[in-house]
Image (cartoon, coloured by chain):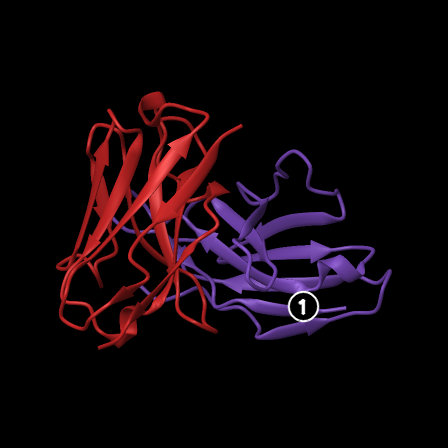
Amino acid sequence: QVQLQESGPGLVKPSERLSLTCTVSGVSISAGYYWGWIRQPPGKGLEWIGSIYFTGNSYYNPSLKSRVTISVDTSKNHFSLRLSSVTAADTAVYYCARDLIYDIRVDSFDIWGQGTMLIVSS
Amino acid sequence: QSALTQPPSASGSPGQSVTISCTGTSSDVGGYDYVSWYQQHPGKAPKLMIYEVSKRPSGVPDRFSGSKSGNTASLTVSGLQAEDEADYYCSSYAGSSNFGVFGTGTKVTV
């Protein structure tokens, strides 16, 4: 059974950088799927942040691209999100998820982590 | 690239049907058959209900169905049940040089 689990600090100060990790269990992250990050501000809709393949090939939402880095560590079977210069607008539940189709990015996610709340506040 | 447009709310009585629309452009919904629908209950992660316009993942009741015409996709929930009350989001692939886009979300009330 494939499971994803996000982990992160919970609280970050404005202008700092946030780092989140998604640990994958039940399948190797090198199995050939794309892995994505999606966020949801309180009371609002979903926003795709970016996706990465186990080779490191990544795609980002242009609205966040200058501040976002997604990386993968196959030895630890996890992938990570880094977002720099955070503001209150980055306060959200952050989800990691697996893209649906093997070896192809289709931005359709069939397995999700439970989500981790990140608050940006001084 | 803008979010896909969904009605803010929809409702129906138990046993009835409700249909939610998702309008995009020829660059996303109209251009690819990678339209998905997600169900989200409060405080929970989204759950994939429909993928590739009309396919259901294993375990999703056949009361949920999807379709697409031009730049608009639709989700129909037939035989509404209390547990169908949730937020629903559509999403679409928009090409390898673009990024995935979600809909604005629809709150379904039973």
The C terminus of chain B appears in which quarter of the rendering? bottom right
Residue B66 screen position, x and y as percent = 63, 49
Q: Is residue B20 left or right of residue A27?
A: right
Which one is nearer the viewer's eye here, A89 or A58?
A89
Q: Quadrant of residue B53?
A: top right
Q: Quadrant of residue A97?
A: top left
Disc 1 packing (10 Å; few <14; some 14–19; many ≥20): many
Image point (14%, 65%), residue name: A16
Chain that the image shows in purple: B
In the image, residue A100 above or below residue A103: below
Which one is nearer the viewer's eye here, B69 or B53?
B53
In the image, residue B28 above or below residue B61: below
Image point (64%, 39%), residue name: B56
Q: Quadrant of residue A120?
A: bottom left
Q: Colour of chain A?
A: red
Residue B46 screen position, x and y as percent = 53, 53
The N terminus of chain B appears in which quarter of the rendering? bottom left
Residue B61 screen position, x and y as percent = 74, 43
Tally of numbered discs: 1
Q: Amino acid at mark 1?
A: Val
What is the chain identity of the residue bearing mark 1? B
Q: Secondary structure at mark 1?
A: strand
For label 1, the residue is B108
Q: Is residue A65 left or right of residue A20?
A: left
Residue A19 screen position, x and y as percent = 22, 53
Let me know if residue B109 appears in the view.
Answer: yes
Image point (39%, 33%), residue name: A24
Q: Is residue B87 left or right of residue A68?
A: right
Q: Residue furthest right?
A: B15
In the image, residue B91 above or below residue B55: below
Let me know if residue B26 appears in the view.
Answer: no
